[in-house]
Amino acid sequence: MSPQRNLLIMYSTPACHLCENAQALIVPYLEQLALDIVEVDISKSDALMESYGIRIPVLKFPEGTEELDWPFTADEFLAFAGANG
């Protein structure tokens, strides 16, 4: 039986180079942390654009309240994932 994987949401928009940078930073850790990433395109929702428009990329766990805004380091991501995932 494989370990249960948690979802990690990345709020982003298409062609966001900062989002690409963040994803490149976190992807190497997803397997060891048993995380699957889901990208949410904020440009499809006025509410999401208002909340995240100038902050993307933003990471969040679906059941959590804490968010991690870019820029962040690998160590900051690992601490966030460990505390919230």
Image (tube, rainbow, N blue to C red):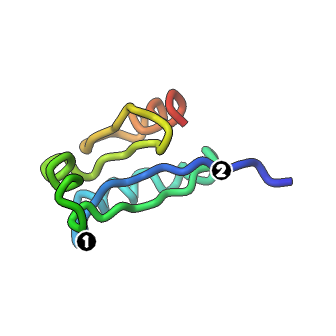
Q: In terms of image quadrants, where is residue 80?
A: top left
Residue positioned 38% across, 32% down in the render: 66
Question: Which residue type carries mark 1?
Answer: Pro
Residue positioned 39% across, 59% down in the render: 24
Q: Position of residue 74 (x, y in %)?
A: 41, 41
79 with respect to 43 (left or right): right
Q: Position of residue 84 (x, y in %)?
A: 50, 32
Q: Which mark is residue 51?
A: none
Residue positioned 23% across, 57% down in the render: 18
Crowding around mark 2 (Cα neighbors within 10 Å: few <14, some 14 to 19, many 20+) is few
Numbered-mark total = 2
39 with respect to 55 (left or right): right
Q: Nearer the viewer, residue 13 or 20?
A: 13
Q: Check disc 1 and report its element: helix, strand or loop.
A: loop
Residue positioned 54% across, 31% down in the render: 82
73 with respect to 64 (left or right): left
Q: Nearer the viewer, residue 40 or 83?
A: 40
Q: Would residue 58 be seen by someone viewing this image from the given angle? A: yes
Q: Which residue is mark 1?
A: 14
| Whether residue 13 is situated above or below residue 71 in the rendered picture | below
| Whether residue 16 is situated above or below residue 63 in the rendered picture | below
73 with respect to 51 (left or right): right
Image quarter where the C terminus lies is: top right
Q: Residue furthest bottom?
A: 15
Q: Which residue is mark 2?
A: 5
| Whether residue 15 is situated above or below residue 79 in the rendered picture | below
Spatial CA distance of label 1 from label 2 is 26 Å
Crowding around mark 1 (Cα neighbors within 10 Å: few <14, some 14 to 19, many 20+) is few
Q: Would residue 17 be seen by someone viewing this image from the given angle? A: no
- First in residue order: circle 1 vs circle 2: 2
Question: Which residue type carries mark 2?
Answer: Arg
